[in-house]
Image (tube, rainbow, N blue to C red):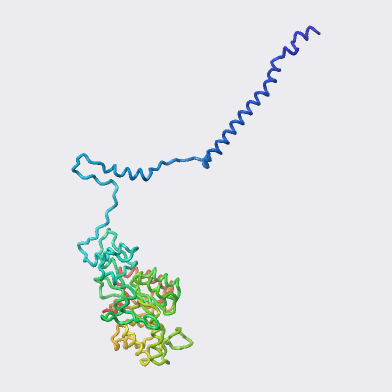
Amino acid sequence: MVAKIAATGSGPDNSGPEDDEGRYRPRLLLIAAILVALASGGTLAWLLLSDNRLAGEPVVRIALVPEESVEAAEPAKAESPADPATPAAPPEETAAPEPADDADDLSPDEKALLDAARNLDNGLDKGIDDKIAAGVKIVGAESVSDGSEPQAAEAAVIVLAVAPDPALVEKTAQGPLPKVARDGRKAWQVYARPLPKGTQPDRRIALVVSGMGISESATAHAIDVLPPEVTLSFAPYGAKLQSWIDRARAAGHEVLLELPMEPFGYPQNDPGPYTLLTSLKPDENLTRLEWLMSRFTGYAGVMNYQGARFTTSATAFKPVMVALGARGLLYVDNGASARSLGPQLAGESGMPSVQATRIVDPVQNPEVIATSLDTLEKVSRETGSAVGIASGFPVTVDALAEWAKTLKNEGYVLVPVTALARE
C-alpha cells in the first residue's frame, strides 16, 4: 500500500495537470473581465467626449464652397485673354435678357404704361410722364405680355383714374359729394372703366352686380371672381365702404352707388334708412340724397334700389334727377318698374342714362339664370346691346363668371355699363 501511494506522486510538490488548470482558471477570467471593462469604458468615454448626436446613424457630408471662395472665383473667369486687346469674355452664366416689347410700335404713353405695369409692387413707375401719373392707376385684373406673344398695349393694360379726383369732390358737412370739375370733367366719364381700342360697337353686353358692400364674403368673392368689365353697384349701408370701392377699382371694376327708393307696399317693404319717398318734400329728399352720395367716392353713377313707386312719380323723381345730372353722374335704371320715368327725366336733364334689359336672377335658380343670360345674348344680337342686373349671391356670381368665359367665342363683347352711355 505504501509503495503504491509513493508511486502516484500525491505529495504537495508533485501536483498533476488538473491541479494546475484549476489554479490558472480564475486568473484568466479576471483578465478577461478587465479587458471587457476597459473596452466598455473607452466606448462610453468616446461617446461622452465627442457629443456626437448622430452617433450610430448614417451621415452624409457635403462640402459647400464658402461665399468668399465663390466671389473670389468669379474674377478668375474673366482672366486676361490671350490677346490683351480683346475684352474679357462675360461669365458663362448670365441673367436672361428681358423679352422684347416691340417698343418701336408703341407710342411714348403706351411705353410708359408698360413700364409701370412691370412695377406694380412699387406703385407708379418713376419714368411715367407727370401728366399721365396724375391720372393713372394700374389695375391688377389685366396682364401685360410676357414676351411670348407681343400684344397691343391698349389690350394689355387697362387704367382707371385715381379716385378720388380732388377736382371732382365737394367737401360738405355730410361728407364728400361728387361735382363737375371746373374744366368740365364729370365723374361718369372720369371714373368709368375705359374700353380697349378697337372694341366693336355691336353685340355688347353689360352686367351690373348689385348689393355689394353688405356681405364681406360675397363682396370679396364678386371682386375676385368676376371679369373686370363687370360693373359693381354698392349699397350705401355697408361697413368700410371706401376700402371696398378702392379694392374693386384696383381689380378693374367701375362702381355705382345704389339709391334706395320707395317701392310699392312701403313701409312694410322698406329699402332702409334715407330712402327717397314720394311723401317727402323735394328739399327733404335732396337732403337724404346728399347723405347717400357722401358714403364713398369714386363712383361713376347711381342705380335705383327698388323704387317701383318713386320712379313713376315725376313730382318726386324729377328734382332728384336734376340734382344727379348737375353732379356729373350716370343714372342706371335697374328695371324695377316698366313704367319708370328714369330714362325720360334723364334726357330732360341732359344726363346720360342706361336702362336694364333684364334682371338676371329674380330667383336663385340656375335654370332661371341661364334663361336670363340667353335673353341678353338674343337682345344683343337684335339691337346691338343689352344690360343685365344681377345680385351678388355667390351662385349668381359663379354663373356669370363661367358664362363670361364663352362670350368672346360666341361673338359678344362684355363691356362696363358706362360704355353703353357713351354711344
Vertical arrangement, residue 243 with respect to residue 355, above or below: above
Query: Quick one: quadrant of the N terminus?
Result: top right
Vertical arrangement, residue 137 with respect to residue 285, above or below: above
Q: Is residue 310 visible?
A: no
Question: Which residue: 37% across, 45% down?
Answer: 67
Vertical arrangement, residue 364 with respect to residue 2, above or below: below
Side of 21 relative to 298 (left or right): right
Choose between 389 and 351: the one closer to the eye. 351
Query: Quick one: quadrant of the C terminus?
Result: bottom left
Percent of width and height locating residue 7: 75, 8
In this view, which residue lies farthest toward the right?
Answer: 1
Choose between 378 and 258: the one closer to the eye. 258
Percent of width and height locating residue 156: 28, 65
Numbered disc total: 0
Percent of width and height locating residue 175: 39, 81
Q: Is residue 338 visible?
A: yes
Occupied quadrant, residue 145: bottom left
Side of 234 relative to 35 (left or right): left
Choose between 357 and 135: the one closer to the eye. 135
Occupied quadrant, residue 421: bottom left
In this view, which residue lies farthest toward the top?
Answer: 3
Side of 239 relative to 32 (left or right): left
Side of 402 relative to 33 (left or right): left
Percent of width and height locating residue 326: 31, 85
